[in-house]
Image (cartoon, rainbow, N blue to C red):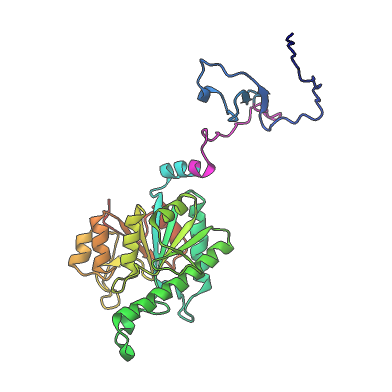
Amino acid sequence: MAFSTSFSPPIVPFNTKSFQPFSPSLCFLKPLDQNVPLMSYKRSCGCMGIHCSSEVGPPSDPMNGRQHQIPHMAPFNMTMREVALSQSQSSYKWRRVLLKVSGEALAGDQEQNIDPKVTMAIAREVAAVTRLGIEVAIVVGGGNIFRGASWAGSSGLDRSSADYIGMLATVMNAIFLQATMESIGIPTRVQTAFRMSEVAEPYIRRRAIRHLEKGRVVIFAAGTGNPFFTTDTAAALRCAEINAEVMLKATNVDGVYSDNPKHNPNATLLETITYQDVMSRDLSVMDMTAITLCHENKIPVVVFNLNEPGNISKAIIGERVGTLIGGM
């Protein structure tokens, strides 16, 4: 003889006092219609059968009788950073930039190798633009501590050894700048061209791009990792590798002049100039290798004065500042 037994779960009374609806919308069970696409429901919680609705109207203002505007919600599965990026693309000229900071500029008034006031000014301006969703990478020089080209030949020091010492100087500047940025809440990563795993990450292109996409500032140190190449060339190379839209060169001068202003008082500041003019007139802006790299990869270069307050943020968001090389 066979018996059929069915069990039903006990019915638990609904306790209204313990029920806490999701704020700001009311959540209730609702079967999904097979004929209606999932994305057509409003603010789906991601659980089958759970439907969150914001049908409750906006509160009215008792003073003037008008309804408050509900802010626009982010699209489904879109992070707040991606929303900021989409908004910044329409508002600002650049989305991803590479900032080249010369070592001499970090020295400030030359009383010491690194001026903390200069690094803090850089950190605050970079922080202001990263909060807008703009991705910032930085290449630092080392001329404030050791310049390989200047020391080559001294006491039997060959050029390769001198350049390697200069690369180590850029790592010192990068670590100092990283510490300054993180002290005001900017997530930062230092990547070096040769391995120094105790203090920094090795340079990996895809990892660097991923850091930028997550809103971190990436500082590239140790140049290209090879002697006979300047940090300007390293900046142009990294700019092309990470697909940055512009290279911003922060120096101690206002931009590119028609002649050396120290020797010619009638020299004028140029607002725009082509790559060919820089190379043919041998203007001491960047070395020829860096200019050639920017020219071949169609990377515009903005040269501006680091010591002028606000110049970094202006240059990053695309405002007119200094000299634009290879204007679009």
Closer to the camera in the image, 276 or 192? 192
Percent from the top left, x then y, of residue 61? 68, 30
Q: Residue at x 48, y 64 (%)?
A: 122
Residue 140 placement (x, y as % from top left) = 41, 68
Question: Quarter of the image holding residue 59?
Answer: top right
Classify 57 as above or below 283: above
| Residue lying at 72% horizontally and 30% vertically, measured from the top left | 21
**Would residue 100 be seen by someone viewing this image from the given angle?**
yes
Q: Residue furthest front?
A: 1
Residue at (40, 53) in percent of width and height? 206
Nearer to me, 321 or 127: 127
Task: Describe residue 300's horizontal placement relative to residue 96 as left or right.
Answer: left
Question: In the rendering, at what x and y percent does residue 186 appear?
Answer: 54, 58
- Name the image quarter holding residue 167: bottom left
Pinpoint residue 316: horizontal percent, then vertical percent.
41, 55
Residue range corresponding to the magenta coloring: 58-83
Q: Is residue 324 magenta?
A: no
**Dominant secondary structure of the magenta stretch?**
loop
User: In the picture, which quadrant includes the N terminus?
Assistant: top right
Front residue of 9 and 18: 9
**163 left or right of 119?**
left
Q: Is residue 154 above or below residue 99?
A: below
Q: Is residue 47 above or below residue 108?
A: above
Furthest residue in direction left, as rendered: 280
